[in-house]
Amino acid sequence: MARRDASRVGAAGLPRGALKKGVCSVGVQRQYTGTAGRVENSQVGVFLAYVSPLGRAMIDRRLYLPETTWCQQPDRLTAAGVPDQVEFATKPALARQMIAAALNANVPVGWVTGDEVYGADPGLRADLEQRGIGYVLAVGCDRRVHVNDGRTLVRVDEIADRIPTSEWQLHSCGPGAKGPRDYLWAWVTTATGSGEHRWLLIRRNWSTGELAFYLCWAPRPVPLHTLVTVAGSRWSIEELFQTGKGQVGLDHYQVRGWTGWHRFITLAMLALAVLTILAAQQPDSDPEIIALTVAEIRRLLNAFVLALPLPPAHTLHWSIWRRTSQARARRSTTSAQTGEVTLEYQPSPSPNRRMPCWHPGRQGRGHPSPPSALVVLPRPCRRQVRGSSPFGRARSKEPDLRKCGSGSLLVRPLWTCGCSVAARPTSIPCVLLGPGRFGRVRSGPAGTGLMITESIAVGESTAAALSQAPGVRGIDDLQRALGALNAFIVGALRREITERRTARLTGTDMSAWQATLGPYLTRMLETGRYPTIARLVIDGAHLNAEETFHHNLITILDGITSHPHT
């Protein structure tokens, strides 16, 4: 069989419920479900999960049928399509069936863990001991165990109260979302005969004092850290259910019958297993980028297989950008545990997440790395960094430099240049007028933030030219003129983009649109209720996009330069 260590763990019978409204879905009734944390009208399934150093996946499932409301009502079972040989079984009994099936199929497993529902079942513990499989099963605080070589029967919470402070050991039961999950642990021998390896494992939260208890057995002696690792593997199973719901829609089914439920759950488990295997095969040798995760592989499959075709380099650019950002976030989490917070510059992706920027003309040029702007702030100043990007978008009142303490820097975003700088509380106005150089500089994998010098040069030329106009008599007028000019350019480009996108999505060009709606618009204009629009459509010149842009730009510039402001 398997090695007797904590590298391969089977999570025994994890019940998960799906909330329901009606009474026709198989197995539904008002019962407690961990999904809602209370008694609700729901279905409850029992799942068997497998955890190893390379990944985790669900390998079996059973649907729980309540005894009174379902198993004792044959007509209801027949209507839901439940096979005749299915009988009532408790949740621990369903877990025993799945574990037996997995072991009979030679699944390599060394340990089994589960919550209090399964720790309280003596049959499950006996089956595991008979097969030589170690277990770490949670029990309630009122559980009684034998100590002193079986001479004393005492509650587990009373044992915890008698353990001296020096006997508690600090161990991590695995990595968590916010770092290592450190708890205080203690263990007491509960063996009643020679050669037995039984323990009561007690976990205490070092900050709140909350206690948890586990009954443990192993075919041979093991250290405390092994039991702690097995007990902590249940956190991985909880994360597995969240991944299954978010990535493969484990709970997004709308079926009522026995066969439909098993088919959907089986397909979802298979999809998650495929993603897990693919993720386990990815190398993790580059410290600057994390390996492909289950979520990232699912995105790539959707982009390459299910979605509209895009250039492969486009999708891979975004995949590398996301994983690089996640690697930087992991390093930042480690730094946050010290006395300083280290922030590194990383360009944000395009605001349009559905249609990220893609520039075929830049393919193969080799984008240089973005500027590495590094700012170190003392811990009390962390609240001044806001927003989704590392330097954040300042959404509240700018903090006063005098309130930051000695050595602190004020982080000021200069969004018009595409980067953030640590500077005095005044920003440099930049105007970007070249093709593709208006508004915010594109960032993320499809662009870079290295056009600051070019932006300032273009902005200086534009501002200098407008400052000589008769209608611009001061810095305030110059700012308004630059704002009006930029607003026109951005609006014209957005209008052109919208028209092209509409034509692409609908498959209708200008000629087809005119042929479809032309007769109706002609009848409306002939009514005489819209005389001005009629003159524009009938008598006005029909210019193309380039001519329209040129004509309107001249009109804007004439308005700025010819009419002094009063």
Image: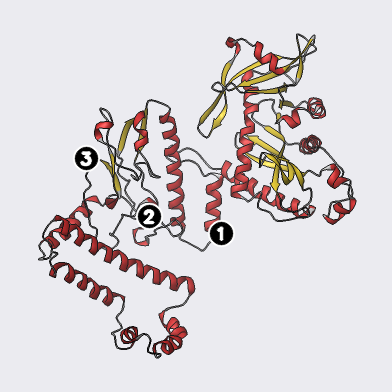
Q: Which mark is residue 446?
A: 2
Question: In the rendered view, does 373 fall on the left or right side of 143?
Answer: left
Q: Residues within 10 Å of mark 3 (few under 14, many from 20)?
A: few
Q: Is residue 494 above or below residue 6?
A: below
Say which residue label 3 marks.
Answer: 424
Label pair 1/3, CB-CB below 8 angstroms: no
Residue type marked 1: Val
Label pair 2/1, CB-CB below 8 angstroms: no
Residue under the image location 37 percent in, 60 percent down: 359
Earlier-in-chain disc, 2 versus 1: 1
| Quadrant hosting residue 139 | top right
Q: Position of residue 450 (x, y in %)?
A: 28, 49
Q: Position of residue 282 (x, y in %)?
A: 54, 43
Say which residue label 1 marks.
Answer: 305
Helix, strand or loop status at disc 2: helix
Q: Is residue 534 above or below residue 387?
A: below
Placement of the N terminus among the 4 image quadrants: top right
Residue type marked 3: Arg
Tag in front: 3 or 2: 3
Residue under the image location 76 percent in, 17 percent down: 145
Q: CA distance from mark 3 to mark 2?
A: 30 Å
Q: Is residue 472 above or below residue 12?
A: below
Q: Position of residue 91 (x, y in %)?
A: 78, 37
Is residue 9 among what the camera can see? yes
Near-viewer residue (166 or 442)? 166
Near-viewer residue (55 or 396)? 396
Earlier-in-chain disc, 3 versus 2: 3
Residue type marked 2: Ala
Instruction: Give the image's coloring scheme.
Output: secondary structure
Residue under the image location 52 percent in, 53 percent down: 300
Q: Residues within 10 Å of mark 2 (few under 14, many from 20)?
A: many
Tag in front: 1 or 3: 3
